[in-house]
Amino acid sequence: MKKNIAVLMGGYTNEYEISIKSGEVVYQYLSKEKYNVYRAHILKNEWFVLTDSNEKHRIDPASFSVKINEKSIYFDCAFNTIHGTPGEDGLIQAYLQTLGIPQTASDYYQAALSFNKRDCISVLKAYGIKSADNFFINKGDEINAEEIIKTVGLPCFVKANRAGSSFGISKVKHTSEIETAIAHSLKEDDEVIIESFLDGTEVSVGVINLNGEITALPVTEIVSENEFFDYEAKYLGQSEEITPARISEADTEKVQRQAEKIFKILKLKGLTRSEFIFHNGEPHFIECNTCPGLTQASILPQQAKAAGIGLTELFNEAVEKALDSF
């Protein structure tokens, strides 16, 4: 009997449009021969299943079920493509776990930890994972620009602590720009992380569960036309993403093993992607995405293609792994 799979898409943040694009790709490629696949839109004001004829059917949050043509449909698994809250910060994971419904992304605590850049970096530093120098600011804190610059130097990056797709991020070149940059980040989150500038090659490494093994995918080199890999570079074509990356075989091996190590340390699962910058010859960790973009143009699908893994195989494997783990 076919399993009912809900492809979760949308979310409560500025990333919801990107998430819907990812969800549509998963809906397109997830095997219809193996599964009954449904598009589940999880939006702030409504949860609904969208049919191929664009009919909306309300999802009952008490049971995570939907009624279509007088038939109640209960989901056996959720394929999580929600970027930001509630899909990437652990909220939807905790909800589904309470209902006993498996989902494809990392579990709630691991998702929350990875989504919190400050906490994630702090945990990984204890395991010897290199990262930029940083300074933390919370909403309402007194801002001492001189102290910040003394710690991280110039230029530096000011980021919203819990946001994705480069929302709430600025590159600061002068001390006078610090307060404006922090105010920009605080529009996305009430916590801010300020990081030193790392000069070097930026790369991205997907790590997945494949045939029961934690496996790093081919490395992607990111060359942005802008000051950094911002929203326009990520989604509006203002960057070059080169897979495999133009780095040595030794560096490729080094960063892949580092990405796999982070996957294991944080006890992640499903489809993930970690970002690094090679600085002074060593990969420095930037962040980890536990619900990465899955559109045709997204980095992880590019890496899977380079590894000879089709999207149907990639997505089916994620569902089977989730079902097996419950």
Image: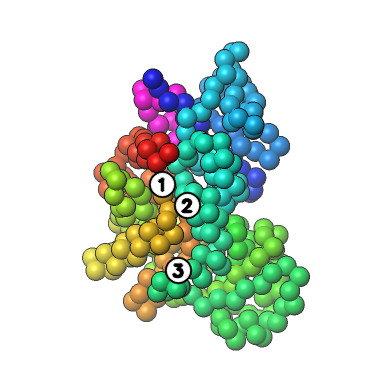
Residue 10: image x %, image y %? 59, 40
Circle 1 sits on which residue?
Answer: 270
Determine whether, in the image, residue 17 is placed left or right of residue 323: right
Q: Residues within 10 Å of mark 1 (few under 14, many from 20)?
A: many
Residue placed at 62% from the left, 73% from the top?
136
CB atoms of marks 2 and 1 within 8 Å:
yes
Residue placed at 51% from the left, 28% from the top?
75
Q: Does dot 1 land on a helix, a strand or a loop?
A: loop
Cα distance between the residues tagged 1 and 3 = 20 Å
Circle 3 sits on which residue?
Answer: 124
Cα distance between the residues tagged 3 and 2 = 16 Å
Residue 270: image x %, image y %? 41, 46
The residue furthest top is 70
First in sequence, mark 3 or 2: give its number.
3
Circle 2 sits on which residue?
Answer: 290
Screen quadrant of the C terminus = top left
Nearer to us: label 3 or label 2: 3
User: What numbered label is drawn on residue 295?
Assistant: none
**Camera-side residue of 234 and 142:** 142
Range drawn in magenta = 24-36
Q: Amino acid at mark 3?
A: Leu
CB atoms of marks 1 and 3 within 8 Å:
no
Q: Does dot 2 land on a helix, a strand or a loop?
A: loop
Task: Using the rendered view, name the quadrant where residue 278 is placed.
Answer: bottom left
Q: Amino acid at mark 1?
A: Gly
Residue placed at 43% from the left, 30% from the top?
28
Instruction: Say whether residue 260 is magenta.
Output: no
